[in-house]
Amino acid sequence: MRNILVAGGAGFIGSHLCDALLARGDRVFCLDNLMRGTKKNIRMALAHKNFAFTQGDAADLAFLKEYMGRNEIDFVFHLAANSDIQASAMDPQIEYQSTLSTTWALLYAMRENHIRQFFFASTSAVYGERCDENLTEEDALSPISYYGAAKAASEAFIRAFCHMNDMDACVFRFANVIGPRLTHGVIYDFIRKLRADPTTLQVLGNGTQAKPYIYADDLIRAILQLHDKASGVEVYNVGVESCTKVSEIAEIVCREMGLPDARIEYGTENIGWKGDVPRFRFDLSKIHATGWRAEKTSGQAVTVAVREALACRR
């Protein structure tokens, strides 16, 4: 039985990962400051004998060094970061505090405790606005958002720490993740807006933005399969081959909410906010070669996620 630290473990993706690790038989130490995560997300895990939750800051180096040593941590999953690109577009300090600082502190605490295995949740945003390229893991990083920049800088520190300290790291660059426990994003926002005003849905941008949406369960399967297979630093694009337009999501939400006559009002720009990437696709050959493939298409993931979000808010 391994002692696993999941930083950001009470968040959307982190809580699903905690559940999966417990089901596999690991002892899970969940660390979260509850800025976006909630105890509701880990309510089932809290009842498990092999689960321990601590409310704390993953950027607090002194705390982390003692915490990792005391709990004899074997492996660190880093999902403690800002996950709302729009929020950090308004306040870039969020990314320094929640994303870059947490990466540095976790890596340094691992170094001090001689922990060698690391998983990092990165993002497709590190590639920047390169709408008509089929991006591979070897392509240059050119982020345009504070969010993407903090993730790219984190990847650079990961490479340095792995080289200097003989660590191994698995880095996943994934697209939009959706599913149960979703706390923000286009689906969440559309439902919230229509609950406030069932007659009108205001959309940021002109609706042509198109991105791949991956269902949470598919992502967790990939993490469990590959997180500890790295030698040095191994980077994977993780997602689906299909994309879904914002206009299609708006129509799905209106339909599933029983509001076919709701007026959808679009903006004029092809982005929702500065730093948003209107569309992208990336090459999935590397992760497909491992045998992993997403079971749900982007459209299927969106439809299921909308239904789940509506069911849990009734």
Image (cartoon, helix red, strand yellow):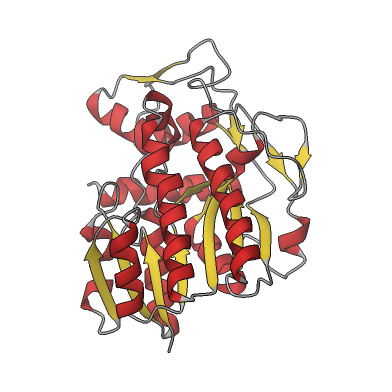
Q: Residue furthest top?
A: 268
Task: Pick the quarter of the image with the N terminus.
Answer: bottom left
Q: Residue at x 78, y 57 (%)?
A: 285
Q: Is residue 117 above or below residue 257?
A: below
- Front residue of 92/198: it is 92
Residue 33 in view: yes
Determine whether, in the image, residue 97 is placed left or right of residue 294.
left
- The mark total stands at 0
Q: Is residue 299 visible?
A: no
Give the percent coordinates (x, y) of residue 217. 49, 63
Residue that lies at the very extreme toward the bottom in this rendered image: 1
144 above or below 110? above
Foreground residue, 110 or 227? Answer: 110
The residue at the point 48 percent across, 68 percent down is 111
Place of residue 160 in the rendered image (x, y in percent of width and height, measured from the top left): 62, 57
Please name whichever residue, 73 or 273, is drawn nearer the observer in this view of the structure: 73
Q: Residue at x 26, y 54 (%)?
A: 33
Percent across and percent down for residue 155 are 59, 51
Q: Quadrant of residue 74?
A: bottom left
The residue closer to the viewer here, 22 or 211, is: 22
Side of 170 relative to 287 (left or right)? left
Q: Is residue 200 left or right of residue 24?
A: left
Q: Position of residue 245 (x, y in %)?
A: 58, 31
Residue drawn at x 59%, y 69% as measured from the top left = 165
